[in-house]
Image (cartoon, coloured by chain):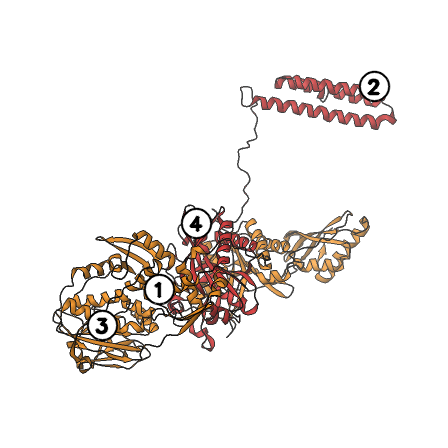
């Protein structure tokens, strides 16, 4: 048999088979067409294949290639017809009785952990403050009196230094009679940075702080703070208000406004409580103010040369407001039914 | 501080509605906590910050209002008529402890008639939150709520020797206060005594023995200054906080002591009759002269970012009670009022002027210059660690930094020094600052088990506190992890962290014997020579100490060591495009031979075509190989940079490796 003849026969076979498969309207019809063309013994494809023996030896590779193409084309045509009939069946009276794939079965579980909501809040705050040019700093949690109080202009008679309001390290371990304590605010880190660095300074200090408190829905003896500090040659309270507004606008979205109410902190003067206006009401943001000249002097800066602002906020409160958490104890119980919600 | 609106009208005109009043006060420093009607008089609750003792009296609040609304402040005269006889004939005052009581004054009224107070006084006291007692006590409270200076009235007849001695309490001394409870006193406390015994706890509460009763006829009026810390410590130690101690803690106006005393005597004679002896017994140091403060106008703009007109600055300072000493175009010099002990510096005046002028006038759209900021390497490393752990099914937890003694001693892999103790327990019984995160994680595991949350894997990143003698302790940043996977599975998690941090060196393990772990199932981990951390299966007994029921694996790593070895910005290394050849090897070795030693023996002789050695599995076939033997299967992958390796070359590499293992470790290759 000449190659061209063989190729023609194959083409004819392909178009016949495809047509018959396409025309089949029932499973039974399709099955008889399948036997006719693809049957293992009497099928037309088989018969044509047998004729290949008569093709010239030199032409055999070409013939074989074509044969394979046609074979797979017929296979695909059959499969297409079969899926068409199955899809058409769609649970109708003549649908197949065999096993069916159920796409509604849930996917295989991927066991994933979660980041603690406090970490998620902290990361968000770091992101925003980072975009505003504030670098993150951390420092020791066990502090001396200089960094926790004195350099922050908290005088010995200030109630904040009371032993009952702080976690002082046991006397046996307070060597050289120098008291040590778990820091009660993250401003300690700002002092450490200022002692080592010349202005300009633009940092946030973050981390755990400790104050003895009875545990209840809003108090826990350990919590997290974020404090911001900007020191430069001409930093004003207007800069403070503007940075807080940028921060709040980034955190909450929309156009948020800031208001200051006078307050009192030893390490800032003037000192204010900052509120932001959001969702139709004023919400407490945190304490803020202009760094007290006594603090600038304590770290070796000249208050006539530089000014600065500082602000601080409680991360638990922010996190709880953000996620509608009503009891601070959830954050530290670490029940996975709680943690898996974030 | 509860303020009666009606009372305020004695000192200042109140044309504005109460809401407007409280809003404006809140915006200028007296936070509004709420208002309740008591009868027809609003009782306004104002929060007074600890630097503003002057606002713990109605006059102080009225002064704020007078400045804000540009009103005139009227302070009542206090010029009572007096007898010819001087009080100093009748009363003697001695101060033995001038450090605790810098000043003490006494006036004496004779022939009073103790009875109920007039209705207007009872009403005002009630609105201000104070119960009426009798006309004498009420007058002292009234004057305190008027000007902020606490006062006390003694039944003069009951003061032995007609004498007042201000001294330290004596060891073992007790005093029955007017609440009829007995208080044990300590030597650091200041008491008022007569010639025999203590009759009052200075600045905190009077004594029952000398209190005003129906029989009282002569009254000694005490107006004094007590030291702030002493008043606070005494009140705290005795758990006896009174309106009087609250005010002394914040400091009183030494220039107002005499006015308060005269005002009290005047009102007392008005409401209870009687006659006032002439003069006052005034012991201790006189009020200190007040310092001058200069305010440079340019500093307001420098610090606040706004300009305030100079006449407005002068008006505000004057209204607050400052007297102007000098002023010119660039600055103003004032003497701050005696009741504002918080005003000592230029910046204090700037705050006063600005808060009254209005913080709302500060713009919130300043152009703050841009500034670069980079993410810290600590945060980059933490992000990788957290990503690996959460992807591996671990929940992040946050637990208290202090633990109970029992947990603290259950394991301490990082140090043998005793845990640092805090004086006050953080949570119930938690005195020990933790030296490892592991017990806390076990606590969370145990808590979740009890909640019915099964197979919980947790991790925490936090400081541990490692004592260093007299220095501040080393605070090491650790990551601790706990799960109920096998040793190999948890080690795989640790290795994933190492891999994602692109740490070139392999973890080196050393066996670690510690009763906390199951025997043989724990290891110390090293990166180079640095201790990275610990890993192991917790033994049943220590697990029970923390209340964990099931078998758990734990690991704890030093984050700084990870950071030291990590490569945060990996650089691309070109890989060979040549095909690899792999050879599987099955070695029979003694139980004591570790995989690491086999790997090292193979690697050391494999040559440059070695692409990797991968551990497959260990199994034991006692029948064929006998006791004490194991089979370790691994795959050697070989690849050349420049050519396709031949099978002969690959076989040679394998054979060299196998021969070295056999000769150095005594293994036998199974073909």
- A105 or B142, nearer to the observer: B142
Please name the residue that numbered disc 3 is placed on.
B262
Whether label 1 touches label 4, CB < 8 Å = no
Mark 4 vs mark 2: in front: 4
Badge 4: how crowded within 10 Å, few (<14), some, or many (20+)? some
Judging from the image, mark 4 belongs to the subunit labelled A
Labels 4 and 2: the sequence-earlier one: 2
Where's the N terminus of chain A, which quadrant? top right
Q: State how far apart marks 3 and 2 are (Cα).
A: 134 Å
Chain letter belonging to callout 3: B
Q: Is residue B194 above or below residue B244?
A: below
Look at the image and give the colour of chain B: orange
> How would you rate the neighbour count of disc 3 (Cα within 10 Å): few for under 14, some for 14-19, many for 20 or more?
many
Q: In this view, does B392 lie to the left or right of B229?
A: right
Could you classify mark 2 by the number of other residues whose Cα lies within 10 Å: few (under 14), some (14-19), or many (20 or more)? few
Same chain for mark 1 and mark 4? The answer is no
Question: Disc 2 designates what residue?
Answer: A5
Q: How crowded is mark 1: few (under 14 residues within 10 Å), some or many (20 or more)?
A: many
Which of the two labelled residues, at mark 3 and mark 1, occupies the earlier sequence position? Answer: 3
Of tags 1 and 4, which is closer to the observer?
Answer: 1
Q: How far apart are marks 3 and 1 (CA)?
A: 25 Å
The residue beneath circle 4 is A277
Question: Which residue carries the number 1 mark?
Answer: B319
Compared with A25, A182 (above or below) is below
Image spot of residue B303 (x, y percent) = 49, 63
């Amino acid at each position: 048999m000449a190659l061209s003849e063989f190729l023609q026969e194959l083409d004819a076979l392909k178009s016949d088979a495809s047509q018959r498969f396409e025309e089949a309207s029932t499973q039974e019809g399709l099955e008889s067409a399948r036997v006719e063309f693809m049957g293992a013994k009497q099928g037309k494809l088989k018969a044509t294949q047998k004729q290949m023996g008569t093709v010239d030896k030199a032409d055999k590779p070409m013939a074989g290639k074509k044969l394979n193409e046609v074979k797979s084309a017929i296979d695909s045509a059959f499969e297409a017809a079969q899926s068409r009939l199955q899809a058409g069946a769609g649970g109708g009276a003549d649908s197949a009785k065999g096993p069916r794939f159920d796409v509604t079965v849930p996917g295989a579980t991927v066991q994933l952990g979660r980041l603690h909501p406090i970490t998620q809040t902290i990361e968000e705050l770091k992101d925003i403050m980072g975009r505003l040019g504030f670098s993150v700093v951390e420092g020791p949690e066990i502090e001396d009196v200089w960094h926790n109080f004195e350099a922050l202009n908290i005088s010995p008679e200030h109630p904040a230094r009371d032993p009952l309001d702080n976690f002082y390290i046991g006397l046996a371990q307070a060597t050289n009679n120098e008291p040590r304590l778990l820091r009660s605010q993250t401003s300690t880190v700002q002092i450490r940075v200022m002692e080592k660095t010349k202005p300009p300074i633009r940092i946030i200090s973050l981390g755990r702080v400790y104050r003895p408190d009875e545990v209840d829905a809003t108090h826990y003896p350990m919590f997290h703070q974020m404090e911001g500090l900007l020191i430069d040659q001409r930093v004003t309270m207007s800069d403070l208000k503007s940075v807080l507004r940028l921060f709040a606008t980034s955190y909450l979205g929309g156009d948020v406004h800031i208001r200051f109410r006078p307050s009192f902190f030893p390490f800032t003067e003037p000192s204010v409580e900052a509120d932001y206006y959001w969702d139709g009401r004023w919400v407490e943001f945190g304490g803020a103010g202009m760094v007290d000249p006594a603090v600038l002097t304590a770290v070796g800066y000249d208050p006539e040369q530089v000014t600065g602002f500082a602000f601080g906020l409680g991360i638990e409160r922010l996190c709880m407001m953000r996620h509608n958490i009503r009891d601070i104890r959830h954050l530290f119980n670490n029940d996975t039914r709680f943690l898996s919600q974030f | 501080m509860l303020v009666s609106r009606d009372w305020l009208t004695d000192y200042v005109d109140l044309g504005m509605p109460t809401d407007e009043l409280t809003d404006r006060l809140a915006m200028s420093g007296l936070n509004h906590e709420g208002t309740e009607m008591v009868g027809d008089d609003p009782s306004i609750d104002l929060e007074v910050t600890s630097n503003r003792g002057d606002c713990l009296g109605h006059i102080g609040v009225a002064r704020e209002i007078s400045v804000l609304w540009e009103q005139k402040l009227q302070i009542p005269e206090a010029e009572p008529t007096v007898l010819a006889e001087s009080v100093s004939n009748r009363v003697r005052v001695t101060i033995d402890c001038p450090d605790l009581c810098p000043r003490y004054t006494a006036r004496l009224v004779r022939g009073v008639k103790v009875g109920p107070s007039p209705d207007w006084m009872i009403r005002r006291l009630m609105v201000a939150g104070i119960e009426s007692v009798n006309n004498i006590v009420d007058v002292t409270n009234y004057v305190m709520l008027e000007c902020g200076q606490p006062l006390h009235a003694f039944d003069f007849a009951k003061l032995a020797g007609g004498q007042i001695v201000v001294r330290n309490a004596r060891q073992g001394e007790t005093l029955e206060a007017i609440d009829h409870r007995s208080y044990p006193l300590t030597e650091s406390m200041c008491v008022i005594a007569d010639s025999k015994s203590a009759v009052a706890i200075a600045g905190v509460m009077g004594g029952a023995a000398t209190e005003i009763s129906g029989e009282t006829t002569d009254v000694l009026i005490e107006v004094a200054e007590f030291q702030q810390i002493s008043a606070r410590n005494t009140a705290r130690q005795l758990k006896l906080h009174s309106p009087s101690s609250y005010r002394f803690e914040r400091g009183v106006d030494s220039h107002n002591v005499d006015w308060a005393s005269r005002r009290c005597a005047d009102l007392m004679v008005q409401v209870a009759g009687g006659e006032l002896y002439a003069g006052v017994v005034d012991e201790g140091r006189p009020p200190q002269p007040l310092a001058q403060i200069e305010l440079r106008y340019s500093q307001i703009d420098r610090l606040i970012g706004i300009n305030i007109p100079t006449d407005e600055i002068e008006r505000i300072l004057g209204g607050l009670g400052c007297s102007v000493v000098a002023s010119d175009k660039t600055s103003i010099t004032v003497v701050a009022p005696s009741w504002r002990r918080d005003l000592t510096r230029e910046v204090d005046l700037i705050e006063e002027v600005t808060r009254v002028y209005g913080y709302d006038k500060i713009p919130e759209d300043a152009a703050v210059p841009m500034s670069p900021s980079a993410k810290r390497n600590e945060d980059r490393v933490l992000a990788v660690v957290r990503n690996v752990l959460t992807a591996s099914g671990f929940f992040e937890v946050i637990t208290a930094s202090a633990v109970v003694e029992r947990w603290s001693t259950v394991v301490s892999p990082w140090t043998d020094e005793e845990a640092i103790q805090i004086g006050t327990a953080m949570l119930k019984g938690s005195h020990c600052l933790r030296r490892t995160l592991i017990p806390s994680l076990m606590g969370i595991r145990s808590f979740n088990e009890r909640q019915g949350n099964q197979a919980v894997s947790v991790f925490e990143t936090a400081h541990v506190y490692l004592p260093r003698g007299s220095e501040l302790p080393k605070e090491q940043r650790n990551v601790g992890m706990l799960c109920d996977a096998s040793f190999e599975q948890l080690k795989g998690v640790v290795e994933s962290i190492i891999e994602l941090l692109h740490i070139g060196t392999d973890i080196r393990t050393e066996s670690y014997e510690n009763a906390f772990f199951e025997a043989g199932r724990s290891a110390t981990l090293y990166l180079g020579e640095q201790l990275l951390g610990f890993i192991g299966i917790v033994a049943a007994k220590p697990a029970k100490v923390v209340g964990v029921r099931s078998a758990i694996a734990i690991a704890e790593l030093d984050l700084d060591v990870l950071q030291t070895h990590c490569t945060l910005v990996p650089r691309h290394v070109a890989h060979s495009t040549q095909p690899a050849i792999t050879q599987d090897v099955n070695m029979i070795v003694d139980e004591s031979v570790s995989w690491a030693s086999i790997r090292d023996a193979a690697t050391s002789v494999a040559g440059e075509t070695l692409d990797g050695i991968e551990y497959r599995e260990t199994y034991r076939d006692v029948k064929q190989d006998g006791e004490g033997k194991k089979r370790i299967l691994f795959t050697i992958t070989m690849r050349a940079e420049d050519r396709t390796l031949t099978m002969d070359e690959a076989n040679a590499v394998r054979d060299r490796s196998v021969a070295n293992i056999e000769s150095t470790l005594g293994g036998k290759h199974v073909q």
